[in-house]
Image (spheres, rainbow, N blue to C red):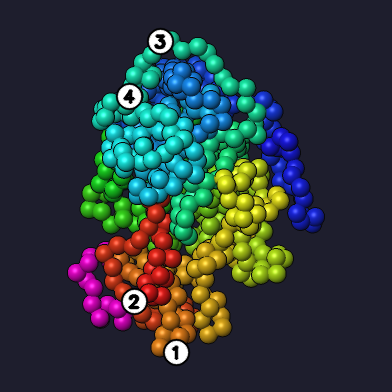
């Protein structure tokens, strides 16, 4: 069944959203590469990393060579290749090389533990591992333990006699080959980031990559051929995959990659070195960047568009960024399951403190505990319908049934639609607090704390008092750690009381040097909650 066609109807009162048209026979990698070559971009810069620049022509050649190398090793269509790569040009080379050959790419988070990788190798049954030299130590013991793993390719220097990435793509001239895939064929998996526990492998198809570009990348994010793009979110993350590959490649733009973990200083250096015009970040990074003494001045950057996602963007952070650089940050929401952003603000229509409105091509519903749509202004759980939903969670039927409900995908977030049709985030469904019989959104309390000039970031969870009643507790990171004191604690509580209904203020505040987060910048509130249960 073609991806653009309507699936089984779940809610008969809602009409199916419009979607782009994709041919049944379709291979994303072949399409995006050939489109750029046909447009005369053979010699235009595609990716820039620490080792230099690769043009669209060079990228197409590398992709063909890598695909030929995998097939030469005996890796077959629909077999999995685990990609544990830092953000260099080898990442898109390997990813697109897999897709072009009909092989399933499984990119994974580069900041996980050995146990996480053991699970993913076993769960995916990967036939081949492609790993950056710097990450190899975490896999060295696992290789012999993985019975399905036949081949290891190392990007960088050779640590133990394994095949080198450069040797794979340095082979003889590859044959021109594109696997006869369809738009609905499995193309890649993305493991969920683990903000709520154990990761799950979301299975995506070829057509969804093009649809995210057609529905969001060009018309909403507004990317153009002349843009130079950088994403703080890494390529292994659904958000980063669109930002730093799918969207810019779809219009022939240039992408600047950073193979190291992003810091305010390293990104400041990139902004000074390259004429980056479109910048994708996450709220925690924007806050840290603004607080950095090395942050560039307005006349040192070329920014014209900025997008945030991953968590709700605090209003104060957005306003401070605009005051400094004259560029609005458009906050949005996307999920691994939907592949990219489907709910967002837009430049000139930003309403700070909200996540914006639905992206055309997607339907949004807020549902109550009875499963029925709530009234405007009431809190409901977010459901989305659109053509880029994952096919399933691999090898996890129970979770698949719970999340993918016919045409609709259950997101697990609580939202309110305000009187202007903007959606306001209240937090994850399991993050919501019920205080004195009334719901409290942790994001609302966090936003109040973040508006205080001493606060860099905050996380709020439910905590039991002496009577076993749940009240808000805040974990706060200060801009200057030495400012922590009982006086400041009381001042922050009073600050919240001035901005919130009285029952919402945090009864306890604990100062922390940092908050537990996923590699994509999402605060792991479940870890903080667990401290109160131990």
Q: Is residue 247 shown to the viewer in this render? A: no
Q: Residue at x 54, y 16 (%)?
A: 177
**Distance from label 2 to label 3 (Cα)?**
63 Å
Q: Residue at x 61, y 60 (%)?
A: 382
Q: Earlier in the sequence, mark 3 or mark 4?
A: 4
**Distance from label 1 to label 3 (Cα)?**
73 Å
- Report which residue position mark 1 lands on: 467
> Element type at marker 2?
strand
* In this picture, residue 48 sits left or right of residue 348: left
- Report which residue position mark 4 lands on: 164
- Report which residue position mark 2 lands on: 509
Residue 217 in the image: state x and y as whole percent. Answer: 54, 39
Residue 143 in the image: state x and y as whole percent. Answer: 36, 37
Residue 172's disc is 3
Q: Earlier in the sequence, mark 2 or mark 3?
A: 3
User: Tag 1: Cα neighbours inside 10 Å, few (<14), some, or many (≥20)?
Assistant: few
Residue 491's disc is none
**Distance from label 2 to label 1 (Cα)?**
19 Å
């Amino acid at each position: 069944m073609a991806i653009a066609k309507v699936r089984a109807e779940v809610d008969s009162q809602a009409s199916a959203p419009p979607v782009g048209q994709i041919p049944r026979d379709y291979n994303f990698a072949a399409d995006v590469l050939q489109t750029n070559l046909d447009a005369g971009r053979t010699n235009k810069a595609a990716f820039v990393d620490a080792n230099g620049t690769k043009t669209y022509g060079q990228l197409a050649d590398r992709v063909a060579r890598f695909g030929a190398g995998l097939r030469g090793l005996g890796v077959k269509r629909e077999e999995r290749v685990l990609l544990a790569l830092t953000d260099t040009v080898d990442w898109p080379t390997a990813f697109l090389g897999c897709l072009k050959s009909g092989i399933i790419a499984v990119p994974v988070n580069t900041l996980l533990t050995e146990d996480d990788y053991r699970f993913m190798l076993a769960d995916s049954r990967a036939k081949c591992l492609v790993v950056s030299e710097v990450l190899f130590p975490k896999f060295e013991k696992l290789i012999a333990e993985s019975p399905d793993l036949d081949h290891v390719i190392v990007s960088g220097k050779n640590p133990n006699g394994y095949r080198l990435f450069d040797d794979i793509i340095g082979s003889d001239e590859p044959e021109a080959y594109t696997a006869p895939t369809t738009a609905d064929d499995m193309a890649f998996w993305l493991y969920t980031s683990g903000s709520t526990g154990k990761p799950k492998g979301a299975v995506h198809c070829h057509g969804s990559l093009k649809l995210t570009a057609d529905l969001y990348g060009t018309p909403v994010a507004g990317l153009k051929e002349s843009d130079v793009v950088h994403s703080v979110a890494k390529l292994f993350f659904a958000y980063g995959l669109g930002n730093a590959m799918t969207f810019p490649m779809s219009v022939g733009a240039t992408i600047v990659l950073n193979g190291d973990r992003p810091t305010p200083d390293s990104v400041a250096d990139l902004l000074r070195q390259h004429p980056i015009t479109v910048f994708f970040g996450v709220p925690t990074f924007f806050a840290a960047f603004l607080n950095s003494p090395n942050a560039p001045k307005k006349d040192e950057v070329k920014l014209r568009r900025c997008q945030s996602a991953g968590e709700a963007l605090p209003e104060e952070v957005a306003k401070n960024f605009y005051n400094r650089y004259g560029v609005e940050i458009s906050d949005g929401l996307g999920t691994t399951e939907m592949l990219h952003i489907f709910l967002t603000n837009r430049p000139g229509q930003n309403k700070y403190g909200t996540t914006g409105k639905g992206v055309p091509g997607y339907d949004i519903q807020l549902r109550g505990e009875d499963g029925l749509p709530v009234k405007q202004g009431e809190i409901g759980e977010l459901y989305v319908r659109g053509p880029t939903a994952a096919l399933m969670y691999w090898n996890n039927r129970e979770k698949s049934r719970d999340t993918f409900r016919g045409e609709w995908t259950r997101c697990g977030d609580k939202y309110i639609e305000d009187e202007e049709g903007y959606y306001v985030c209240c937090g994850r469904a399991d993050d919501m607090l019920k205080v004195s019989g009334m719901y409290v959104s942790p994001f609302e309390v966090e936003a109040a704390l973040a508006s205080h000039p001493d606060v860099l970031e905050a996380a709020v969870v439910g905590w039991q008092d002496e009577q076993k009643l749940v009240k808000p507790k805040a974990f706060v990171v200060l801009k200057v750690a030495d400012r922590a004191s009982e006086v400041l604690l009381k001042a922050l509580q009073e600050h919240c009381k001035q901005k919130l209904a009285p029952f919402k203020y945090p009864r306890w505040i604990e100062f922390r040097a940092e908050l537990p987060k996923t590699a994509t910048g999402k605060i792991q509130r479940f870890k903080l909650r667990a401290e109160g249960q131990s």
